[in-house]
Image (spheres, rainbow, N blue to C red):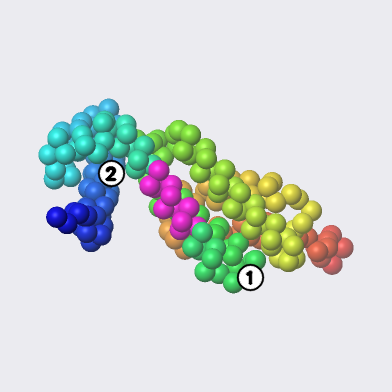
Amino acid sequence: MYAYRVPRLWTDTMDAHRKAVRDATMDATATLVAEQGVASVTMSQIAERTGIGRATLYKYFPDVESILAAWLDRHIARHLDYLAQARDQADGPAERLRAVLEAYALITYERPHGTELAVVLHRGDHVTEAEQRLHDLLRDLLAEAAGSGDVRDDIPPGELAGYCFSALAAAGSLPSTAAVRRLVTVTLTGLLSCAGPHPEQHGG
């Protein structure tokens, strides 16, 4: 007799299938929440929207809240990966800083506003942890840029990171991506070191 072993291709295919079902379930749930609110969404609706049976859905998630928690984890992970990629694809401290600020501002601009899905995005320990990771990422970039003379070094990088997040929060209410990029430029200007007094201070 031969010992039976599941082929790698089969296990890879099954893993891909399970991931596809989870992703489709999370996407369907997020859409339903945005359409009708968290309280109105049922597992039956999610199963129907996803195109799977209820019994299959319960093999993946016990309830709506667990689906939303998984969706939020995935959402945060994708954004953190996006910011890390923006950082790694740029050359030099100043370019890396601009790339991450612009990526973060565009995320803020595209984030849903005025819906229950927006409320989901701002709740739980997941968000607190993500905000800390974002703060650490930006603080390190600012420290690097300060060391190279690209931004001011008279204020701690952690405080400058807070300034950036506060300034870029305005991206959520801007009318276009062009306006978002202008906001990033203004934010970066506030990070520049004051090399000396402005001409008008000399009466010139």
Span of residues in magenta: 73-83
Q: From this viewpoint, which residue is outermost toward the right?
A: 202
Cα distance, mark 1 to mark 2? 38 Å
Q: Do the residues under discs 1 and 2 have CB atoms within 8 angstroms?
A: no
Taking the spot 55% from the left edge, 63% from the top edge, the residue there is: 87
The residue carrying mark 2 is: 26
Amino acid type of the residue that numbered disc 2 sits on in the rendered structure: Met
Give me the disc on residue 92: 1
Res. 180 in view: no
Residue toward you, 179 or 192: 192
Numbered disc 1: secondary structure: loop
Picture coordinates of residue 77 (x, y %)? 43, 50
Q: Main secondary structure of the magenta part?
A: helix
Inspect the magenta stretch and tell me whether residue 33 lies in it.
Answer: no
Taking the spot 52% from the left edge, 69% from the top edge, the residue there is: 89
Amino acid type of the residue that numbered disc 1 sits on in the rendered structure: Gly
